[in-house]
Image: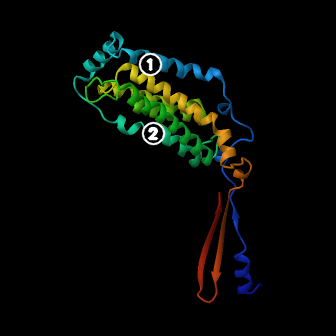
Amino acid sequence: MLPLQALCATSELDSLEISPRESDISSETDTLCEVFNSKQLIVPGIFMVSGLVGAIDYENSLNRSVNDAFNDLSDGHTCKIDDYIRFLPSASHLVLGSVGVKSKHNFKERLLISATSHAAMLIMGYGSKFIIEEQRPDLSNNHSFPSGHVALAFTGAELLRQEYGTAYGIAGYAVASAVAFLRLYNNRHWFNDVLMGAGIGILSARIGCWLLPFERNLFKINNKSNKTSTIAITPAYNVADKSLSVSLYAVF
């Protein structure tokens, strides 16, 4: 039988290696969303052109008709949940891959895509507010065009679709559509503001993915090195104090 000291010395060398989850590993090659394709501009382009045309005359008959219908529906009531759920798709894009859902990019890459996408959304969306100065239908200020809430929600929805596939994308777009509905229901935007916000959001998410290959080079992110995540758990027993301890060593 080995002496107790020898057993303790051996135990300090024992470790448990835990390989990284497949859900948080990026592929060897660029994913489809990272490759620019002019066809990817069609959907956001339709939304943005439609919204811009409406902004030229935001009191046109279509905007008036849509907003009048929503005013009749709300009958003066409001629902402010859109102030909170607009963040849900973007937050899900970052978190889902870290809790077991299979993702196309690792966390660092998702963070870069998200940061770039939201920066593009802010520049296009909030920049337009101060250039066009469209009056809100409730007359509260002149920053109606485009809808920032909708732009943020659709950015997150498209990020979800690109990262996790159609099923998660549908869920994200359902939330984004609810935000768009509530912006009209609460009389905070014209119909064209919502269309433009949706277009900006979708385009922003695609810009974030298109620029990822350049950001990998800029920030020295290597796909292969990202796969070497290791967690080591080392138990140890102190003979003198008769105490047991555990050390955790992690590299991501």
Residue farthest toward the left in the current orientation of the protein: 76
- Label 1 Cα crowd, 10 Å radius (few <14 / some 14-19 / many 20+): some
The residue depicted at 72 percent of the width and 46 percent of the height is 223
Where is residue 122 shown, x and y percent of the image? 46, 36
Viewer-closest of 144 and 96:
144
**Residue at numbered disc 1:** 52
Image quadrant holding the N terminus, namely bottom right
The x, y position of residue 83, in whole percent, is: 35, 37
Instruction: Classify mark 1: helix, strand or loop.
Output: helix
Helix, strand or loop at disc 2? Answer: helix
Q: Residue furthest front?
A: 131
Q: Quick check: 62 left or right of 21?
A: left
Residue 175 is at least partly visible in this image = no
Left or right of 5, for residue 81: left
In primary-sequence order, the first of circles 1 and 2 is 1
Is the residue 165 above or below the residue 39 in the image? below
Q: Residue furthest bottom?
A: 240
Kindly identify the amino acid type of the residue bearing the numbered disc 2: Leu
Residue 32 position, x and y percent, is: 68, 31
Q: Amino acid at mark 1?
A: Leu
Horizontally, residue 247 falls left or right of residue 187, namely right
Residue lying furthest right: 1
Q: Which residue is mark 2?
A: 88
Quadrant placement of the C terminus: bottom right
